[in-house]
Amino acid sequence: MSIPAICIVGWANSGKTTLIEGLLRQLTAQGMRVGVIKHTHHPLPEDEAGKDTARFQAAGAATVTLANPEGALTREAGDKRLTELLSRVRDVDLILIEGFEKQACLPMIEVWRDPALPMRSPAQWRRAVVTASPCPGDLPVFAPGDIEAVAAFVLSLTAGQRGCAGAQAHIYLDGQELSIVPFVQRMVAGVNRGLLSTLDGYHEGCEITIRIGGENKQ
């Protein structure tokens, strides 16, 4: 089953990490298991020159796992897409994502500190704004310290994702099914159902089949 996910988006130093910390405390106090995915442009701590991890990767290792009695951390070479990162998260009830506003097709909460700056999240995915400033538009607005209300909104927002978690999409190329992660399955299914829902004959729960033939070659 796909795990519900939501993005916390905003400019640098807007308070995204602080908001996620508050949400983690609030949601885990309610008995939820919450995972976090964060996008950063800074070097990872294990990348420091001379560290064992950096030395192993410089020698050609594709992955390096650091382990101690408190847990383990795996470092992989190469940039990772959000869809791939989401597919690897297991055994949690909710995923909070910091950033990835250019990749994610997911509900987003904008943390907006400086009214002189435009909002960073795409309007079609923005569902609420956390700010201490007057905010234009008709979206829900929360004060930065009102973590309890934001957490309740997150749960109501992701309840819809839980409801459509069973939606699946299968894509075939010349009869061979492609392997796609649940997040992409849900996105493809949702987009196609949305496009076709206005057509005569469509009904909720129906199975949709789309066939696109290749160009005939002489």
Image (cartoon, rainbow, N blue to C red):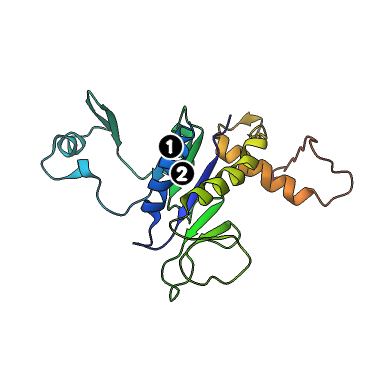
Residue lying at 28% horizontally and 32% vertically, measured from the top left: 73
Q: Position of residue 54 (x, y in %)?
A: 18, 39
Question: Is 19 rendered above or below residue 77?
Answer: below
Quarter of the figure that contains the N terminus: top right
Residue lying at 10% horizontally and 41% vertically, measured from the top left: 50
- Whether the residues at callouts 2 and 1 have beta carbons within 8 Å, the answer is yes
Q: Along the line of sight, which residue is nearer the eye, 7 or 64?
A: 7
Question: Is 49 rendered above or below residue 180?
Answer: below
- Amino acid at dot 2: Leu
For label 2, the residue is: 96
How far is mark 2 from mark 1, CA to CA?
6 Å
Q: Position of residue 144 (x, y in %)?
A: 44, 59
- Amino acid at dot 1: Gly
Residue 35 numbered tag: 1
Dot 1 surroundings within 10 Å: few (below 14), some, or many (20 or more)? Answer: some
Residue lying at 34% horizontally and 62% vertically, measured from the top left: 13
Secondary structure under tag 1 reads: strand
Q: How many marks?
A: 2
Q: Position of residue 167 (x, y in %)?
A: 67, 35
Q: Along the line of sight, which residue is nearer the eye, 188 or 154?
A: 154
Secondary structure under tag 2 reads: strand
Q: Is residue 169 left or right of residue 29?
A: right
